[in-house]
Amino acid sequence: MAMKDLHSEIMENILLRLPVKSLLRSKFVCKDWFNIISRPQFAKSHLRHPQTQARIGLCIIDYGDNSDDKVVGYLHSTKEYDDNGELLDPHRFDDIEETLNLNAPQILDSCDGLFCFVDGYHKIVLWNPSTRQHNQLPPNPNLSDNDFSPYREWESPRGIEKIENYYGFGYDSCSDDYKIVGVFVPDHDSNIRIDVFSLKSYSWRRILQKDYDADSYVVNENGVVFHGAAHWIASSSSSSSSKYDRHPITLAFDFEKEQFKEMKIPVNTIVRARLQVIEERLCLYDHYQDEIEKWVMEEYGVESSWIKLPPPIYMHINIFNEQSSYQLWGFLNSKYLLRVDFWEFILWDHKENTEHKVMTFEPMRHRRPIFFVETLVSPYSSFHTPIV
């Protein structure tokens, strides 16, 4: 190996250990560093590095309390605290709608540090909050503004809202491709249509169109990405003789096979049930007032492997103000993201019995917190990069 190649390999190994913020600055130190950090393969290696996987950010999307409010984003590092044990002040994006050219966007789950936004006109934007890159994807040619209204909801026979149109975002490791799946039932007929967008081919494909028998329907449009699939809480009558006799399930879309599958879940109600990934396992939890149920799937895809976990210690020991109410919003390894009295988020470590204040909001504002990995992954395909 030539000395120059050895030097380049050593330098790359050093750079792989740096956080995204440092790498973005390091690109402009010299031409060699710029070339190393700019390579797509470097971004993939950096994503898989253990130190990168340990750098978890928290994005809180604040939708406000009425339609006139601007959609604001707050980016936190979960590793940086001030002297009072509070997370450092976040980076604030004052107007996501204007920045990303969207109208009332819904945010899907994070995948490899990328966020996917979908707005009321089916415009879709991929955004990497760590690099500030964003990419508005081409419109779906199979959709008509007159036929579809995204996230349309109506009452089911059992009084549960079901969602006719929804999206999922994830990664196909077999083809090394980020994909978006859209499920639509138009207003004027009973055909279900399923379309898939491939970032690698930069195009939409219709993979299914058939009569919609409503065997399964999603009741929470925020799909959770895990094990190469997007997962939603859903209701199904596929194994019942009556459409009124329904049972809760997890509906999963496999991005490699481009197929849906159902998995039974061990709860009887899905009104407040949520999915999350915790310690590389699919987790199901239901938190209402002072009661909580938390289940994990020990072996992915095996319905009999669901295990019920004991409630967290704060349900038994008053470590907080007894006059306050706490709602579970998510997990980060041993930490619980809790909403306190509808106006404050805290991270509580149940192993160390410590808490870190995240931030406060005005009461009753609509917010969506999402954990993400801080990466260099580009929202563009290698064949459709921005002109700088």
Image (tube, rainbow, N blue to C red):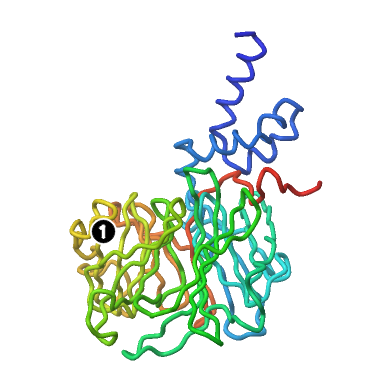
Q: Where is residue 277 in the image (x, y as percent from the top left)?
A: 37, 57
Residue at the image position 33 percent from the left and 77 percent from the top:
235
Residue 295 pos. (x, y %): 24, 63
Q: Who's the residue at 30% across and 80% down the image?
A: 289
* Above/below status of 234 relative to 48: below
Could you classify mark 1 by the number of other residues whose Cα lies within 10 Å: few (under 14), some (14-19), or many (20 or more)?
Answer: many
Q: Judge left or right: residue 43 versus residue 27.
A: left
Q: In which quarter of the image is residue 66?
A: bottom right
State the residue in front, 341 or 234: 234
Q: Is residue 316 above or below residue 245?
A: above
Image quadrant containing the N terminus? top right
Residue 71 in sight in this render: no
As drawn, 237 above or below 266: below
Percent across and percent down for residue 266 are 22, 68
Q: What element carries label 1?
A: strand
Outermost residue on the right side: it is: 388
Query: Disc 1 residue type?
Result: Val
Q: Where is residue 16 in the image (x, y as percent from the top left)?
A: 56, 32
Give the residue at mark 1.
296
Numbered marks: total: 1
Q: Which of 237 and 5 is in front in this view?
A: 237
Q: Can residue 207 be seen in this view?
A: yes
Query: Which is more toward the observer, 153 or 3?
Result: 153
Instruction: Identify which residue is drawn at 24% across, 74% down.
Output: 239
- Residue 131 horizontal side relative to residue 110, left or right: right
Residue farthest toward the top in the current orientation of the protein: 2
